């Protein structure tokens, strides 16, 4: 308690409260947190190792899977260790610089994740609508360039937020009722005029979600049109199977994201701890499920993972 009071009086430190009203259950809540995180790391690192070792998997599709796996490793890693430190050791203090850094990397990875899903939709579009030109249109070098562009875009979009917030004075009450440095909580603690920051964050949300989802919907609209023109039922089935996995991954990412945004903006009657748990699950569940979905749905990858595990044993 003494450490808590000391940290609270420190003007360079914020207090992350974890999950308010559920403090007594923090130890129990840490069990699924750590379990999901470990499964996520094991699944995504296994995917990266298998793709790296198997020459037959050095293709654009699997390079995109590696990019997705990297974002799935980074996303919970920026949140879970600090959350577990709160749950297990009551280490609630975090510096202002550390808080802004966590916010920057977390949202940068999120925008990068969305860009990767857009590139994967483009990959499926080329594979189905222009199969004969797939190898000439998409190469590993092009995928790497698109990944770099996605990373630059993410940094360019997100960097102004922590820079603008770092110039704001923060009020005496530096308590954040969350397990992470959520930007809306920082807005509420800022004592200066944050009109520009609010407008920028709203524009950013609509630009990223709106632009990326529009491109994905457009890609799948063209894919469905191409599939409907195919007369063979077997070809229909094959084409749909190539898209089902990506659609499942998109649903695990965008559905909780949109749901979380709407519950925060409109769900005023929802208890704060429900908002926090939903926000944390959004960062934990998709990274855990993605390698499982691809491992089950992609036969070539499933066979290589089985071979890799057997060889390791």
Image (tube, rainbow, N blue to C red):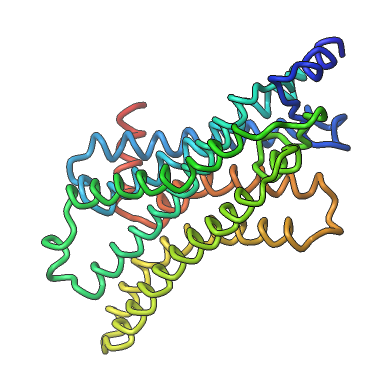
Q: Nearer the viewer, residue 32 or 8?
A: 8
Q: Nearer the viewer, residue 283 or 246?
A: 283
Residue 102: name its quadrant. top right
Q: Is residue 222 left or right of residue 129?
A: right
Work out which quarter of the rendered image holds the N terminus and state it.
top right
Measured along the vertical axis of the image, is residue 147 above or below residue 100?
Answer: below
Q: Position of residue 271 (x, y in %)?
A: 85, 51
Work out which quarter of the rendered image holds the C terminus and state it.
top left
Residue in view at x 84 percent, y 32 percent: 25
Q: Is residue 225 visible?
A: yes
Q: How many marks?
A: 0
Q: Is residue 289 left or right of residue 1?
A: left
Q: Is residue 49 left or right of residue 71?
A: left
Q: Position of residue 72 (x, y in %)?
A: 47, 42
Q: Is residue 40 visible?
A: no
Residue in view at x 44 percent, y 70 percent: 214
Residue in view at x 75 percent, y 42 percent: 188
Which residue occupies the extreme front position in the image?
Answer: 193
Residue 82: name its quadrant. top right
Measured along the vertical axis of the image, is residue 152 above or below residue 120?
Answer: above
Q: Position of residue 15 (x, y in %)?
A: 75, 26
Q: Position of residue 87 (x, y in %)?
A: 75, 26
Q: Nearer the viewer, residue 93 or 239?
A: 93
Measured along the vertical axis of the image, is residue 123 above or below residue 278?
Answer: below
Residue in view at x 70 percent, y 21 percent: 13
């Amino acid at each position: 308690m003494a450490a808590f009071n000391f940290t609270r009086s420190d003007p360079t430190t914020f207090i992350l409260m974890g999950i308010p009203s559920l403090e007594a259950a923090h130890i129990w809540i840490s069990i699924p947190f750590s379990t999901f995180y470990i499964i996520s790391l094991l699944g995504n690192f296994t995917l990266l190792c298998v793709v790296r070792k198997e020459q037959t998997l050095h293709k654009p599709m699997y390079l995109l899977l590696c990019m997705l796996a990297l974002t799935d490793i980074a996303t919970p890693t920026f949140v879970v260790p600090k959350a577990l430190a709160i749950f297990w050791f009551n280490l609630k203090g975090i510096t202002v610089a550390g808080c802004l850094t966590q916010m920057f990397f977390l949202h940068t990875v999120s925008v990068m994740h969305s860009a990767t899903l857009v590139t994967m939709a483009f990959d499926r579009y080329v594979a189905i609508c222009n199969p004969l030109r797939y190898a000439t249109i998409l190469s590993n070098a092009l995928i790497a360039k698109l990944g770099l562009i996605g990373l630059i875009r993410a940094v360019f979009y997100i960097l102004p937020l922590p820079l603008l917030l770092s110039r704001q004075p923060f009020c005496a009450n530096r308590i954040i009722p969350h397990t992470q440095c959520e930007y809306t909580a920082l807005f509420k603690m800022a004592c200066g005029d944050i009109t520009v920051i609010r407008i920028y964050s709203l524009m950013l949300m609509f630009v990223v979600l709106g632009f990326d989802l529009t491109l994905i919907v457009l890609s799948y609209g063209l894919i469905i049109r191409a599939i409907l023109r195919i007369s063979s039922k077997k070809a229909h089935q094959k084409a749909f199977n190539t898209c089902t996995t990506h659609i499942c991954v998109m649903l695990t990412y965008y559905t909780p994201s949109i749901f979380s945004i709407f519950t925060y903006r409109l769900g005023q009657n929802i208890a704060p701890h429900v908002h926090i748990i939903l926000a944390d699950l959004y960062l934990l569940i998709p990274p855990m499920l993605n390698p499982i979905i691809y491992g089950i749905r992609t036969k070539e990858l499933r066979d290589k993972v089985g071979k890799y595990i057997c060889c390791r044993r």
